[in-house]
Amino acid sequence: MRKVIFLDRDGVINQFPGYGKYVTSWQEFRFIERSLKALERLASAGYEIFVVSNQAGVGRGIYSKEALEEITRNMLDALEERGITLKRVFYCTHRPDEGCACRKPGTLFFEQVLKDYPDVPKDEIFMVGDSDKDIVAGKRIGIRTALVMSGQVRVYDPKEWPENYRPDLVCADLLDFVEYRLGGA
Ligand SMILES: [Mg+2]
Ligand SMILES: [Zn+2]
């Protein structure tokens, strides 16, 4: 069976730029060291890795689409050097007020991917993210969800989360998740 995983970018793969802030250039992009190890493990276990990221800073005119593309190119190159291939990186560059279907917790990109994996049971697929939007998106599409504490949300208090939108797992970071999922340390 094919293995599929969805990851958020900021706060999961690279360091969270701060609430309401954006990674506007490659110079500002910092990998989370432990996440590189996690990605290596996912890649060598045969996972097809999809990144789904909200980048409303583009829609707000804070950085350009070209700048975002440059960040992506550099990120993909750096990962390839470690033998990590990301299957596809999806960005929503709309502002929240544009009401698009692709901005998480919207599920458009997830639906597009899942169409190609009709045989993979949804409970075998995780969305790993650092914010409520990531978790709600995953829940809406019916896959499992893991909240990591390496980004926006630093403390998980279930009382602050609607019952039907609570993460299935709470992990310190992506490597913690991978160790749970794939076993071993
Ligand atoms: Mg994030
Ligand atoms: Zn969008």
Image: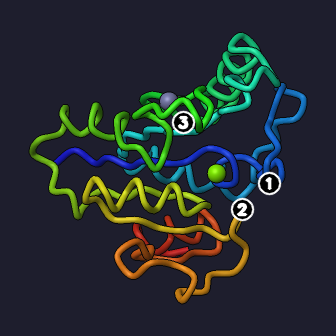
- Front-most of residues 42 and 166: 166
User: Count the marks: how many?
Assistant: 3
Q: Identify the residue at image location x=80%, y=35%.
A: 23
Above or below 177: residue 93: above
**Nearer-N-terminus badge (3/1):** 1
Q: Which mark is residue 19?
A: 1
Residue 174, above or below 48: below
Residue 7 is tagged as: none
Q: Label 3, label 1: how many angstroms apart (C-alpha)?
A: 28 Å
At a point 75% along the width and 15% down the height, the residue shown is: 64
* CB within 8 Å, label 2 to label 1: yes
The answer to whether the residue bearing label 2 lies less than 8 angstroms from the nearest atom of ligand 1 is yes
**Which residue is denoted by mark 3 in the rendering?**
84
Residue at screen point 25% across, 61% down: 124
Residue lying at the far top of the rendered structure: 66
For the residue pair 91 and 117, the one nearer the viewer reads as: 91
Image coordinates for residue 154, horizontal then vertical, percent: 73, 74
Nearer to us of marks 2 and 3 is 2
